[in-house]
Amino acid sequence: MSVKHFTNSAEFDSAIQTAPVAMVDFWATWCGPCKMLAPTIEKIGESYGGKALIAKVDVDQCQDLAARFGIMSIPTVVFFQNGKEVGRRVGVQPPAAFTGALDQLL
Amino acid sequence: MSYDILVIGGGPAGLSAALNARARGKSVLVVSNDLEDNPLWKSELVDNYPGLPGVTGAELLKALEDHAARAGAEIRRGKVLNTAYDGESWYVSIGADVEDAKALILAAGIVRGKKFPGEEALLGVGVSYCATCDGGLYRGKDVAVIGYDAESRREADFLEEIGCRVRFFQSPAQVEIQGQGKVSGVTVNGEELAVDAVFLLRPSMVPTDLFPEVETQGSYVKVDRSMATNLPGLFAAGDCTGGPLQVAKATGEGLIAGQKAAAYVDALTRKKG
């Protein structure tokens, strides 16, 4: 399993509601720090993809989602449990910051 | 492209580090502000740099940069905003670009002045250090751009182009950012404005903002005799490691950092293979 790319909010909502644990990276093509985080998210997708939903949302493509989650700086990574937000991390962080949060939820 | 060594800061320490890393045959990228933004640029007389009596700060900076460039160091104007280490390489974001290197040399000088009231608490929820990173989130909204270097004006123009309503302030003395959970306004030199975002563009980042896990002593980066920090492959040189804040000390430390970073890269290459 790798990283799921959501392109609209309907797709996002149905997937998030059914996933016990999800991690979503809000990013944009023009954002340097987002590009830097991309390989980390890919690696987490490979290692955690079987256990959790690892996904990305392009904030330009899904402006409604960015507004709904109050994304004010990117990259922002939001964690969900049973469809509800349970935490978020703003900015580029080491892989362990994300895997640690996932391990706590799983 | 991958580099052996990436140098953050194009002042005397960074340029000396680049020169000496090139002398060891390493590929080097120096990320630097415009030379005019270096505080040394305005120095009319540097009278204690050995062998060059009467030289001005601007002459010295230009000569140092020419020397490093002639030695083959690549020099890029820009600002490093984020770094990450994946266990093998360092990744560095420069505006909207990302570069990677085996070793980093932090030679970004010192940040003058304290953070503003509200800055730390509202960072990431309206306070941003990077117009090209977060600007797109504030299209059609009111933003304040508070700039302390030559590039700030261009960043403000960029925000205007992508559709933000921009108020630009050049080097104001008093700034206070307001908001609960997110930015709602800013007071600049007594003038109150309602804004959704405040972009603070300073010539240099605080070392712990770039490297949250780096060990410090007071506001300075802690280094050993080989200019190594506590983080793997991260060296530091110049004003950011402490006083005296003088050019000769900076170039000397840059030399050590450049050589030791080159040795670190060699050791890494040997280990791999």
Image (cartoon, helix red, strand yellow):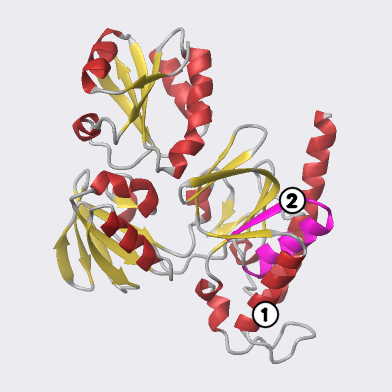
Start-end of magenta stretch: B11-31
In which quarter of the view is residue B87 placed? top right
Q: Any magenta on residue B27? A: yes
Q: Amino acid at mark 1?
A: Leu
Is residue B33 shown left or right of residue B268? left
Q: Label 2 neighbourhood size at 10 Å, few (<14), some (14-19), many (20+)?
A: some
Looking at the image, residue B225 lies above or below residue A39: below
> Mark 2 = which residue?
B27
Q: Residue furthest bottom?
A: B54
In which quarter of the view is residue B170 placed? bottom left
Viewer-proximal residue among A106 and B149: B149
Is residue A66 shown left or right of residue B235? left
Whether callout 2 and callout 1 share a subunit is answered yes
On the image, the x and y values in percent for residue B109 come to: 57, 65
Looking at the image, residue B13 lies above or below residue A21: below
- In the image, what residue occupies the spot 49% across and 57% down? B206
In which quarter of the view is residue B221 placed? bottom right
On the image, the x and y values in percent for residue B131 come to: 36, 54
Mark 2, secondary structure of its residue: loop
The answer to whether residue A92 is visible is no
The answer to whether residue B171 is visible is yes
- In the image, what residue occupies the spot 35% across and 73% down? B171
Do callouts 2 and 1 mark residues in contact (Cβ within 8 Å)?
no
- In the image, what residue occupies the spot 46% across and 47% down? B96
Give the number of the mark in front: 2 or 1: 2
Looking at the image, residue A35 lies above or below residue B210: above
Q: Amino acid at mark 2?
A: Ser
Mark 1, secondary structure of its residue: helix
- In the image, what residue occupies the spot 23% across and 36% down? A70
> Mark 1 = which residue?
B60
Viewer-proximal residue among B131 and A7: A7
